Image (cartoon, rainbow, N blue to C red):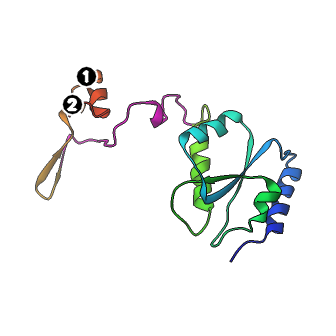
């Protein structure tokens, strides 16, 4: 099933008119597996421009391609895979863009891409026992030596 062009175009027109958005001030995003790969850098640009985003996402077979010609959209993909619909990619984009906006995370140092982070994180207790085996937090993390901990997080020491 392919979504017809006219309902999508009318929906976008309705949104831009009813909310007093001007199409030229809004960014129209068309989610497609063939679009430009979405990254944190793109999310940052969208957040910095503080413009309204209208995300158009299809379902199953997609949307009539004439919508792209009428509305002049930017095609974006969240990854090299196909889903049943664009709802999840839209949520991914919204989350990634929102976290780039000052104050959303509460602390400017919160975004992981702005700090040294390792793929592994640990909680208490220091030793976790499971099926007779002990699993320990790496000793470096218990040392209190911040420089060495950062080196460990960046993979420079074991």
Answer with left or right where residue 36 lies relative to residue 130: right
Q: Residue at x 78, y 45 (%)?
A: 26
Judging from the image, what secondary structure is the residue with disc 1 in? loop
Mark 2 = which residue?
140
- Characterize the magenta stretch by its predominant secondary structure: loop
Residue found at the very far left of the displayed protein? 132
Q: Are marks 2 and 1 in contact (CB under 8 Å)?
A: yes
Mark 1 = which residue?
145
* Residue 2 point in image, percent of width and height: 71, 74
Graded by Cα atoms within 10 Å as few (under 14), some (14 to 19) or many (20 or more), the crowding at tag 2 reads some
Q: Residue at x 28, y 34 (%)?
A: 155
Using the rendered view, name the quadrant where residue 152 is placed: top left
Asked if 117 appears above or below 134 in the picture, the reply is above
Residue found at the very far bottom of the displayed protein? 1
Q: Which residues are magenta?
A: 105-128
Instruction: Check if residue 122 falls in the magenta segment.
Output: yes
């Amino acid at each position: 099933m392919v979504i017809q062009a006219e309902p999508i175009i009318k929906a976008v027109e309705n949104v831009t008119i009813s909310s007093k958005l001007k199409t030229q001030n809004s960014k129209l995003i068309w989610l497609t597996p063939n679009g430009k790969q979405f990254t944190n850098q793109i999310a940052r640009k969208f957040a910095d421009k503080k413009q309204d985003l209208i995300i158009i996402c299809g379902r199953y077979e997609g949307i009539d391609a004439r919508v792209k010609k009428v509305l002049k959209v930017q095609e974006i993909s969240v990854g090299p895979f196909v889903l049943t619909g664009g709802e999840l990619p839209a949520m991914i984009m919204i989350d990634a863009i929102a976290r780039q906006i000052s104050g959303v995370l509460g602390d400017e140092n919160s975004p992981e891409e702005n700090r040294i982070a390792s793929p592994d994180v640990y909680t208490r207790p220091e030793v976790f026992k499971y099926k007779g085996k002990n699993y320990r937090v790496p000793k470096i993390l218990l040392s209190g030596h911040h420089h060495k901990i950062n080196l460990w997080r960046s993979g420079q020491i074991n």
